[in-house]
Amino acid sequence: MTQSTDTLDRLAAVIESRKPANGGDPEKSYVARLLHKGPDAFLKKVAEEAGEAVMAAKDLQYGAGDAKALVGEVADLWFHSMIALAHFGLSPADVVAELARREGLSGLEEKALRKAVAREQGE
């Protein structure tokens, strides 16, 4: 296992331990507070962090920002996305498995395949 997946796995375990069902205390933990408030709270944070990541990338593109700012915003986005995954019983391993499944497919082929599957399910 690589360092990056080890780090994600450790963080996922901490997030899991902060779920209210696992004793997470909303008074003592930011993660527990978001999970206690429910999907609207942490999904709002995912959207907010995605916007901030976009703005940091745009700043970097135009010479008004730095790489550290973009990395920090993407880290915030990943963190809040991991809270959403945990809430829905998923983990970083599920995302890594999906990325591995897509590996070697062109983005256009993968998108076309998703559309075909969606059409089949809609029939």
Image: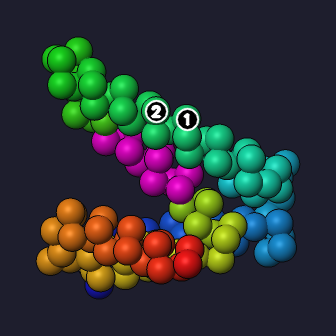
**What residue lies at 38% left-to-right and 74% top-to-bottom?**
116
Residue that protrudes farthest toward the front in the picture: 123
The percent position of residue 57, horizontal first and vertical second, equals 28, 31
| Helix, strand or loop for disc 2 | helix
Q: Is residue 9 magenta?
A: no
Which image quadrant is residue 108 in?
A: bottom left
| Relative height, residue 109 to residue 36 (above, below) | below
* Distance from Cα at disc 2 to Cα at disc 1: 5 Å
Query: How many neighbours does mark 2 have within 10 angstroms: few (below 14), some (14-19), or many (20 or more)?
Result: some
Horizontal side of 85 relative to 63 (left or right) equals right
Q: Which residues are magenta?
A: 71-81
**What residue lies at 39% left-to-right and 36% top-to-bottom?**
53
Q: Which mark is residue 48?
A: 1
Is residue 9 in view from this perspective? no
Amino acid carrying mark 2 in the image: Gly
The percent position of residue 101, horizontal first and vertical second, equals 29, 82
Of residue 16 and residue 88, the one placed in the foreground of this image is: 88
For mark 2, what is the residue?
Answer: 51
Horizontal side of 97 relative to 13 (left or right) equals left
| Relative height, residue 92 to residue 1 (above, below) | above
| Relative height, residue 123 to residue 87 (above, below) | below
| Helix, strand or loop for disc 1 | helix
Tell me the chief SS of the magenta region: helix
Tell me how the rendering is colored.
Answer: rainbow
Assign the N terminus to one quadrant of the image. bottom left
Query: How many neighbours does mark 1 have within 10 angstroms: few (below 14), some (14-19), or many (20 or more)?
Result: some
Is residue 71 in view from this perspective? yes
Label 2 close to label 1 by CB (< 8 Å) = yes
Of residue 14 and residue 110, the one placed in the foreground of this image is: 110
The percent position of residue 13, horizontal first and vertical second, equals 58, 74
